Image (cartoon, coloured by chain):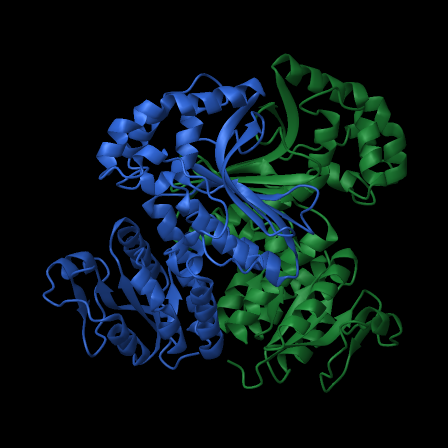
Chain colours: A green, B blue
């Protein structure tokens, strides 16, 4: 237990998730006065707020303070120096999706700075970075928590960790891991009724804010591949990278080179027939098509792509933009352990981050 | 962090769950040499093994050592003295379902001894005991973990705690909370096919070891009422006791006074027509009947009993003896957060206990 019973928190990234996180953090700090959570750094890509004496930045006005700051963010190595020298334990909360920030986790952890993040990059990139992250944490005793890297605030990472830590063996993981893909297929190929044209559903999803600015960043399957990489590694498979197993892209070859998401969306309707054919083929089997990921631990097979499911299957029956993740293990062998619910959105993603911070603080403060 | 980086563990109860827990603990201690988990006490209702110098009891042979012990278990107050005086942090693992042991948690916690348990009694009994438990923990800094009190190893308690701690508001909890009731209704009123006679299904469940020795201890609904009491309290409702809200018993009035479970089972078939009528009534509505519990936080209404569900509803579609627990909250308002899977059995129940111990040790060692 640190002498001051205080934890210093540095927040990088104040986008959708970052803003929700700051709101939750503020409520948390008000409710749980001890240990004292002290915001000593906040930054976006252009600005930062911090001071040599680690003066606490007021939670309620942190965003405004940042907006009016004249300081530029320091280099990451410099930020880590700053946090490692703090007069009590420090936590880096990375609410970005930046590879550069992820690459700095091993340095931060090796210097005793813990990391909490929804950023998938460090856990789903090269296997070497994964190893470096956990080796650095093991050597210094600093902790790294990343619940929101899969299924947002759903208890997915904590569950697979509990299974493995208590000696269970995961045999199969399967599910719908993308809120965007979930929404698209639940609307395009509903279990009841006809569903819309594929290109219309993609446009609708974008209008609702369910896709990345360029929808191809969802349709290429890489986001799902990253999540499966993380889960497979936690289940014990040394997956080299998210491109080291088959990933089906839903971007027609001809549209890969479109210069913008808008151009892509304009031209997508020309490929509606292809998607209708897939839907009709599934329908002929009494099934519906869904975009899923699966990991077979024994055969080390990981797959991401379209599969057909009975209409009564939990994966087919999913609603809205929900995720569903099913674990089969030695203990959960007759029927799987299933976790289901909203897997995207600022508040539920931030909840995973805030929950991680609560657990981390209980361990280090 | 304790000077010795050691945690002393006392285990009360070596029945089905206790044996599985000891196996998991042994594997865990072998895999994670630091912090050193040291078994310093083990007992069943008649015997105990412990020594004044806290000499470690060998994990692999602990059960045999206990069987050949000539020591009687000490009084609980004396056991707590022993643990409070240990040269490092101590944890009491209560694998019994004893009210007496549960009543001793406040004393243990106030003396700095943490508690890990699947025993529901302390959390689902009087509201005063609940308050005493958490007040004692708060005052001393000792911790109390009880994941397996609801849904066995399924991450139910940790999830509702995460939701509440991060500032979410639970609005409704609903589900199938009893593996026994799940099995009975999935067989008696399956979504497809006819299902068996009620009394035959109860006999089959008992033969499979899915019921208590006297099946009335499952059919009276009290086990489900206890689980709902725990969840309701964690959601913020000051529930007085598990009998302070309506609980439907499936024991016919005329059979309440049977002197044994066997006599009850013999006479139960005379009441099959009543259950068939319930099934037929649901069928007329295109539904099936299930034994569920629900908590409406806003109206403070808690109910346990039979309800009808569409055949496509996740509660109707449950398999085997699975539990399903659905949380609606402010954040998970469009669709609920759902956790589903096996909710009974030695290994999955012990997993919740072992998982709690891992988390506890990370906090106190």
- Looking at the rendered image, the quarter that the C terminus of chain A falls into is bottom right
Does residue A328 lie above or below B14 as drawn? above
Q: Position of residue B73 (x, y in %)?
A: 19, 67
Residue at 24% across, 76% down: B78
| Residue drawn at the location 40% of the way across and 46% of the way down | B222
User: Going by the picture, which residue comes out furthest to the front?
Assistant: B254
- Pick the front one: A119 or B221: B221
Residue A181: which quarter of the image?
top right
Q: How many numbered circles are shown?
A: 0
Q: Position of residue A52 (x, y in %)?
A: 74, 85
**Which picture quadrant has residue A94?**
bottom right
Q: Is residue A223 above or below residue A46?
A: above
Q: Is residue A166 above or below residue A7?
A: above
A23 relative to B316 in the view: left or right? right
Q: Is residue A240 visible?
A: no
Measured as percent of width and height from the top left, residue A93 is found at: 67, 66
Q: Nearer the viewer, residue A3 or A80?
A: A3
Q: Is residue A78 left or right of residue A302?
A: right
Instruction: Please tell me in which quadrant of the rendered image residue B106 appears.
Output: bottom left
Q: Is residue B334 visible?
A: yes
Q: Nearer the viewer, residue B164 or A52?
A: B164
Drawn side of residue A37 relative to residue B52, left or right: right
Residue B138 image point, x, y percent: 49, 74
Judged left or right of residue B278, residue A106 is right
State the residue in front, B195 or A90.
Answer: B195
């Amino acid at each position: 237990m640190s002498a001051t019973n205080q934890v210093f928190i540095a927040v990088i990234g104040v986008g959708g998730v970052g803003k929700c996180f700051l709101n939750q953090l503020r409520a948390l700090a008000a409710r749980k006065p001890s240990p004292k959570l002290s915001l000593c750094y906040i930054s976006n890509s252009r600005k930062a707020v911090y001071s040599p004496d680690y003066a606490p930045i007021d939670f309620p006005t942190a965003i405004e303070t940042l907006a009016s700051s004249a300081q530029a963010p320091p280099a990451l190595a410099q930020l880590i120096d700053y946090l490692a020298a703090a007069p009590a334990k420090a936590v880096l909360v990375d609410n970005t999706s930046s590879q550069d920030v992820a690459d700095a986790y091993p340095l931060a952890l090796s210097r005793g700075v813990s990391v909490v993040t929804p950023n998938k990059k460090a856990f789903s990139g090269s296997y070497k970075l994964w190893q470096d992250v956990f080796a650095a944490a093991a050597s210094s005793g600093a902790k790294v928590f990343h619940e929101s890297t899969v299924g947002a605030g759903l208890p997915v990472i904590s569950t697979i960790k509990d299974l493995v830590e208590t000696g269970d063996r995961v045999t199969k993981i399967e599910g719908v891991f993308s809120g965007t893909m979930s929404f698209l297929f639940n609307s395009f190929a509903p279990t009841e009724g006809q569903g819309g044209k594929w290109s219309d559903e993609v446009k609708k999803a974008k209008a609702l804010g369910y896709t990345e600015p360029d929808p191809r960043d969802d349709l290429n399957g890489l986001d799902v591949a990253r999540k499966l990489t993380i889960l497979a590694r936690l289940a014990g498979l040394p997956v080299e990278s998210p491109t080291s197993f088959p990933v089906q892209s839903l971007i027609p070859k001809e549209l890969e080179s479109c210069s913008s998401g808008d151009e892509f969306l304009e031209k997508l309707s020309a490929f509606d027939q292809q998607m209708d054919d897939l839907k009709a083929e599934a329908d002929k089997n009494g099934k519906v098509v869904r975009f899923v990921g699966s990991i077979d631990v024994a055969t080390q097979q990981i797959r991401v792509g379209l599969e057909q499911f009975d209409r009564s299957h939990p994966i087919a029956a999913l609603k809205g933009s929900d995720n569903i993740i099913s674990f089969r293990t030695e203990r959960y062998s007759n029927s799987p352990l299933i976790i289901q619910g909203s897997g995207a959105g600022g508040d539920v993603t931030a909840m995973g981050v805030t929950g991680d911070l609560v657990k981390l603080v209980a361990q280090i403060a």
